[in-house]
Amino acid sequence: MGPTIGTVEMHAGGEPVRIVVSGHPEIPGVTILDKRRHAAEHFDHLRRLLMFEPRGHADMYGAIPVTPDHPEADLAVLFMHNEGYSTMCGHATIAVARWAIEHGLVSRQEPVTEFALQVPAGLVRVSASVTSGRVGRVTFRSVPAFVAHRSVVVPIPGYGETTLDVAYGGAFYAVAEAAAFGLRVPGSPIADLVDAAWATTRAVSARLPLHHPDDADLGFLYGTILTDGADAWSEIPTANVCVFADRQVDRSPTGSGVTARIAIQHAAGLIPLGVERGFTSVVGSRFTGKAVTETSVGGVPAVIVEVGGEAHFTGTATFALEDDDPLPAFLVR
């Protein structure tokens, strides 16, 4: 028998979170980015085992707790998906927060529990409402979010020239209106939205340089977010769909994507500090976001964004691999 790995299964806003709780080897490294590189180089077979079929699927998502190296961190996690390891994930942060509090990994306080979570992008401040031991709404304050490219025109093969923004919310996203591709969010077939977003990701990656002043490992385009175009503040939530990694579709509004969209909206003067906005996903789930503080990163104007949502448990699992299994991990689309 090969490896046996135990997990807690959750979702936040409909997006799965498979949290590894046993069986994964300890991941060495001085910093969390060292650990992320080590996991990619030495334990990627375990990521594929947990994310791919027959134990997962093309849109599975997971988290691996690791030892923090930041002096203020209470916990640390790596995030994983169908392509590799994320630098930040908002929906998984919300799920990990509930799991950590209710399983005693951090000291639980009622009515509010606060702790610091280290992720590859940096330190995230988490606050959760707790009633009778149960975690409800979770909010987190992001790493500094900023606009890297504003209203740039990029030729997208098959779609023509498209105006879009690129912003960082713990990961870099291209953000464009679905209408620019003749599509609607919600309303258009998911396959059509994925095709347009994937073409955009590839075109932007090839044409626009990306740099993060904190570490070169953060300087890559993670995905594309297609929106309903409703960037100006309104009491009506704005809808979007995020296609990230290898054509993976986020069922949630995307926590780091909400962070990036708030950075764009604030930089454009469309939403002031302290004003909360609702964001909805392709399955109708809802997160909130607001810019709470102006700051800078590497001399670039930035904001700290607070994102809120809820997570739910869906089960537990023990995954195994028999030595003679000819199909340990694969994907069919």
Image: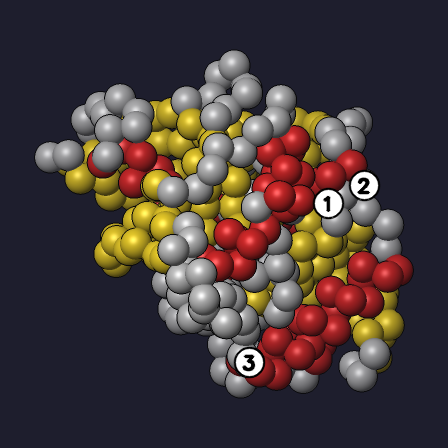
What residue sits 66% from the left and 79% below the top? Answer: 195
Q: Nearer the viewer, residue 100 or 157?
A: 100
Quarter of the view holding residue 74: top left
Amino acid type of the residue that numbered disc 1 sits on in the rendered structure: Val
What residue sits 48% from the left and 26% below the top? Answer: 67
Amino acid type of the residue that numbered disc 2 sits on in the rendered structure: His
What colour scheme was applied to this rendering of the protein? secondary structure
Percent position of residue 155, x then y: 86, 72
Left or right of 202 in this view: 310: left
Q: Which tag, 1 or 2, sits closer to the chain's start?
A: 1
State whether residue 6 is above or below residue 236: above
Left or right of 327 in this view: 85: right
Residue 147 circle label: 1
What residue sits 59% from the left and 51% below the top? Answer: 44
Quarter of the view holding residue 217: top right
Percent position of residue 121, x then y: 61, 36
For numbered disc 2, what is the local secondary structure? loop
Residue at mark 3: 333
For numbered disc 3, what is the local secondary structure? loop
Residue at mark 2: 211
Query: Could you classify mark 2 by the number of other residues whose Cα lies within 10 Å: few (under 14), some (14-19), or many (20 or more)?
Result: some
- Given the current orientation, which residue lies at the most extreme left position? 132
